[in-house]
Image: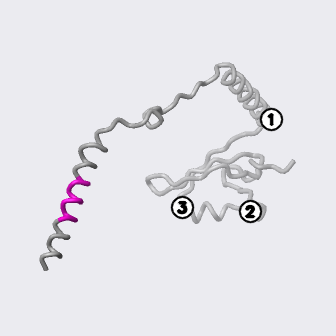
Amino acid sequence: MKKFFSVLIFIILIGGGGYFYYTQVQQTKAPDKVATDTGTVVIQKEELAKEAEEAKKIAKKVKEKRKNVKEYKETFPSWEEFNNKENDDTSYTTEEHPDKKLYLVVASENEDGSISATFNDEPVNKPK
């Protein structure tokens, strides 16, 4: 029994020493240079200017391509009535524009429960 207690006290002393070493020595060390360097990102002004110019060209092409497309905004009292306006070919026919085939761009529910929808007179993803 005496041997058991002496081994137990020895293990407790070793554990206490290890804990002291860890808290006092290891945690107070400064981090490595690698750990403190977050790095920097160098943004090339020329690259950004080039990409901005390309984006402007693409936006201009899209705007030119869609300049004859008209947009229509409609409000429906419920989703059920909105869904009843849909034709078999995914176009919509509304009471305000019964002679036109309208194609849905976006529809959302308002706070009062009515549905606001935006339509185009051409399909948004028209096949080429």
Q: Amino acid at mark 3?
A: Ser
Residue 37 horizontal side relative to residue 20, left or right? right
**First of labels 3, 1 by sequence position:** 1
- Mark 3 and mark 2: span between their CA atoms? 17 Å
User: Within 10 angstroms of label 3, few (less than 14), some, or many (20 or more) residues?
Assistant: few
Residue 80 is situated, as x and y percent measured from the top left of the image, at: 58, 66
Question: In this figure, which residue is indicated by the disc labeled 3?
Answer: 78
Judging by the rendered image, the residue that carries numbered circle 2 is 87
Q: Position of residue 13 (x, y in %)?
A: 19, 60
Q: Secondary structure at mark 3?
A: loop
* Magenta stretch contains residue 102: no
Identify which amino acid the numbered label 1 is placed on. Answer: Lys
Residue contact at pointers 3 and 1, CB within 8 angstroms: no
Q: Position of residue 31 (x, y in %)?
A: 38, 37
- In the image, 4: left or right of 124? left
Give residue 65's mark: 1
Could you tell me residue 3's position as x and y percent? 16, 75
Q: Which residues are the magenta region?
A: 10-19
Looking at the rendered image, the quarter that the N terminus falls into is bottom left
